[in-house]
Amino acid sequence: MLVQVRDNNVDQALKALKKKMQREGIFREMKLRNYYEKPSERRVREQAEAVRRARKLARKKAQREGLLPGKAPAARPGAPKPGGRAGGGAPRGGGFGGGPR
């Protein structure tokens, strides 16, 4: 794997290298090789990963088609927060806080 260092900027090159390694799955491979994994355990793990991927894909498809609610859109800076009080004011009491008796 090759990464060029431009303008003597090693930090940027290191960031690019880490991103390439992440994309290639090298970190994951190293983590898996830390210990021996029996072939039966490997099959079980890979099957579970496949099921997880299929469910995620189905969930994304359902969200695109409008069958499931998607993630909440990112809040704009300066916009009022949903469910927030307009007046602000003092925080509400409740719970087991150390309020006055």
Image (cartoon, helix red, strand yellow):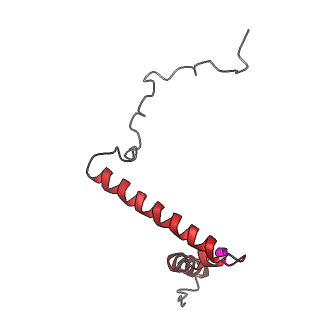
Which residue lies at the image location 31% right of the left edge and 56% below the top edge? 61
Which residue lies at the image location 70% right of the left edge and 21% below the top edge? 97
Quadrant of the rendering where the C terminus is positioned? top right
**Residue 17 on image: x %, y %:** 56, 81
Q: Is residue 87 left or right of residue 93?
A: left
Q: Is residue 17 left or right of residue 83?
A: right
Compared to residue 71, the image places residue 82 above or below, namely: above
Residue span colored magenta: 31-35
Residue closest to the eye, 92 or 5: 92
Q: Is residue 72 left or right of residue 28?
A: left
In which image quadrant can residue 42 be found?
bottom right
Quadrant of the rendering where the N terminus is positioned? bottom right
**Residue 84 on image: x %, y %:** 45, 28
**Residue 8 on image: x %, y %:** 58, 86
Which residue lies at the image location 54% right of the left edge and 86% below the top edge? 7
Which residue lies at the image location 56% right of the left edge and 72% below the top edge? 43
Is the magenta region chiefly helix, strand or loop?
Answer: loop
**Figure label count:** 0
Compared to residue 94, the image places residue 55 above or below, namely: below
Residue closest to the eye, 38 or 26: 38
**Residue 77 on image: x %, y %:** 41, 43
User: Is residue 87 within the magenta segment?
Assistant: no
Compared to residue 67, the image places residue 24 above or below, namely: below
Spot the residue most to the top: 101
Spot the residue most to the front: 40
Compared to residue 101, the image places residue 41 above or below, namely: below
Spot the residue most to the left: 65
Q: Is residue 100 left or right of residue 2?
A: right
Residue closest to the eye, 83 or 66: 66
